Image: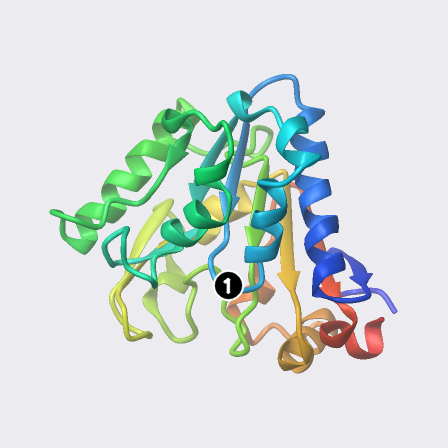
C-alpha cells in the first residue's frame, strides 16, 4: 500500500522510532554545510527522540553551532510550567548539549498577550528567513517534526478552529479548542519545509493514522503539503495494517 501522501517508515517499537528519528535529524544537520533550522514538536512521542539527541554518539556528531531550534507550537504558559513544550525540550536535551543559547528560540509567554506572542514569534521567524514573504524555492524550515493527535490535529492546528483558514500569517494565536491557549505555526509556515517528519507511536494512533494514510482529508494533519517531502515515522502499533 502507498500512503495518500508522503513515505512511510515503520519501526518495531517506539524506541526504534526514536533512534531512527534522531539519526535522521543528525544526518540531515551534519550533511548541511550551512545553517539548519529545525521546528520541534511537543507531546509525548518526540521526547525519547530528543533524549537520544543528548546522548552519545549523536551528542558529539550533531553540529550544534549550525543548528537553530524553533517550536512548531506552544501552550501559552510560563516556560517553567510542566505543560510547556519548551520546558520539555529543554529538559530532554537542550540543557545537556553544547547548544548556543542564541540558536534556541522559545515562544514568549510571559508579559505579553496571546496575540503579541504570535506577532513576536512571526517577526523572529522572518528575521531568521531574512524576508517577509515565503518563497517556494527557499524553505523556511529544513526539518519540521510533527505529532499526530487522535483527533487528527498536528502542531496546534486544532479541528474546528479559525487557525485552519489562516493563509497569510506564519504564526497564529489559538485561543480556543483546548484548556490552554496556544501559539502555533500555520499551514504556510509548516508547508515551507524541506522535510516534514511525522512521529506517530502507539496503538491509540492507529485509527487516525490509517485514515490519513488512506486519503481521508477530514483532519488538519491531512492538509500538510510541504514544498519538500513528508516522511511518516511510525511504530508497528501505530502503523497497524500498514506495517
Vertical arrangement, residue 111 with respect to residue 3, above or below: above
Residue 127 in view in this figure: yes
- Residue 107 x, y percent position in the rendering: 30, 45
The answer to which of 109 and 167 lies nearer the viewer is 109
Residue 204 screen position, x and y as percent:
62, 81
In the image, is residue 116 above or below residue 66? below
Q: Residue at x 55, y 26 (%)?
A: 64
The residue depicted at 63 percent of the width and 57 percent of the height is 198
Residue 218 picture location, percent across and down: 56, 76
Label 1 belongs to which residue?
Answer: 154
Please say whether residue 5 is visible from this viewpoint.
no
Seen at 67% across and 37% down, the residue is: 56
- Residue in the picture at 50% in, 63% down: 154
Name the side, left or right, on which 113 lies relative to 4: left
164 or 116, nearer to the observer: 116
For residue 6, which quarter of the picture? bottom right
* Mark 1 residue element: loop
Count of number-bearing discs: 1
State the residue lying farthest toward the right. Answer: 1
Between 7 and 49, the one nearer to me in the picture: 49
Amino acid at each position: 500500500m502507498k500512503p495518500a501522501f508522503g513515505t512511510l517508515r515503520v519501526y518495531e517499537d517506539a524506541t526504534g522510532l526514536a533512534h531512527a528519528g534522531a539519526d535522521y535529524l543528525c544526518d540531515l544537520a551534519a550533511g548541511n554545510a550551512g545553517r539548519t533550522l529545525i521546528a520541534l514538536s511537543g507531546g509525548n512521542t518526540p521526547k525519547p527522540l530528543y533524549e537520544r539527541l543528548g546522548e552519545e554518539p549523536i551528542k558529539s556528531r550533531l553540529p550544534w553551532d549550525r543548528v537553530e531550534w524553533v517550536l512548531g507550537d506552544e501552550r501559552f504558559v510560563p516556560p517553567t510550567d510542566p505543560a510547556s513544550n519548551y520546558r520539555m525540550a529543554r529538559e530532554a536535551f537542550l540543557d545537556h548539549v553544547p547548544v548556543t543559547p542564541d540558536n534556541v528560540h522559545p515562544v514568549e509567554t510571559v508579559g505579553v498577550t496571546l496575540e503579541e506572542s504570535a506577532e513576536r514569534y512571526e517577526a523572529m521567524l522572518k528575521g531568521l528567513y531574512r524576508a517577509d514573504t515565503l518563497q517556494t524555492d527557499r524553505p523556511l524550515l529544513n526539518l519540521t517534526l510533527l505529532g499526530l493527535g487522535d483527533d487528527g490535529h498536528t502542531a496546534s492546528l486544532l479541528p474546528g478552529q479559525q487557525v485552519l483558514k489562516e493563509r497569510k500569517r506564519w504564526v497564529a494565536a489559538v485561543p480556543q479548542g483546548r484548556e490552554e491557549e496556544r501559539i502555533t505555526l500555520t499551514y504556510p509556515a509548516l508547508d515551507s519545509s524541506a522535510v516534514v517528519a511525522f512521529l506517530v507511536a502507539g496503538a491509540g494512533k492507529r485509527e487516525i493514522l490509517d485514515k490519513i494514510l488512506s486519503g481521508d482529508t477530514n483532519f488538519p494533519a491531512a492538509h500538510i503539503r510541504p514544498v519538500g517531502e513528508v516522511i511518516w515515522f511510525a511504530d508497528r502499533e501505530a502503523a497497524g495494517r500498514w506495517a
